[in-house]
Image (cartoon, rainbow, N blue to C red):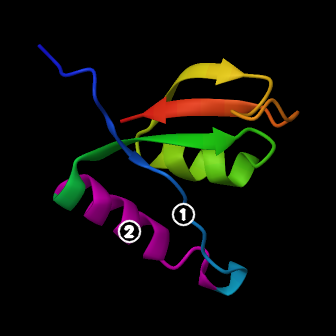
Amino acid sequence: MRNNFYRKIEMLFLSPNSHRKGFGKMLVQYGSEKYSAEEVTVNEQNPKAKGFYEHLGFKTYKTRATDEQGNPYPIAWMRL
């Protein structure tokens, strides 16, 4: 039976000149291997970020039209 507690990647930002060089994938893999990180929330208005996590195997399991503070930022919860 799987535990209901999931370790989460809270924020991952790379400067644009670091995109598409493998750094993001390396950081997510490190978090997954060392800290059992298997969940992330993504602003759905950032399709590149969502696509990045999908490419790494994350799947959306929940969405909401607002963020946790009620602001109009649609959020997708994703899990490996």
The extreme top residue here reads 1
Q: Residues within 10 Å of mark 1 (few under 14, many from 20)?
A: few
Name the quadrant containing residue 33. bottom left
Q: The C terminus lies in which quarter of the figure?
A: top left
Question: 31 or 22: nearer the eye?
Answer: 31
7 relative to 40 in the view: left or right: left
Question: 56 or 80: nearer the eye?
Answer: 80
| Mark 1 touches mark 2? (CB < 8 Å) | yes
16 relative to 32 in the view: left or right: right
The x and y percentages for residue 13 are 60, 68
Q: Which residue is mark 2?
A: 27
Q: The N terminus lies in which quarter of the figure?
A: top left
Q: Amino acid at mark 2?
A: Leu
Q: Which residues are magenta?
A: 18-33
Please tell me whether mark 1 or mark 2 is closer to you in this view.
Answer: 1
Q: Residue at x 81, y 43 (%)?
A: 45
Q: Is residue 26 magenta?
A: yes
From the viewer's perspective, is residue 59 above or below residue 4? below
Tell me the chief SS of the magenta region.
helix
The x and y percentages for residue 67 are 74, 34
From the viewer's perspective, is residue 65 above or below residue 68? above
* Residue 78, label in figure: none
- Between the C-alphas of marks 1 and 2, the distance is 8 Å
Q: Secondary structure at mark 2?
A: helix
Q: Secondary structure at mark 1?
A: loop
The x and y percentages for residue 54 are 52, 41
Q: Amino acid at mark 1?
A: Leu
Q: Which residue is mark 1?
A: 12
The extreme left residue here reads 1
Q: How many marks?
A: 2
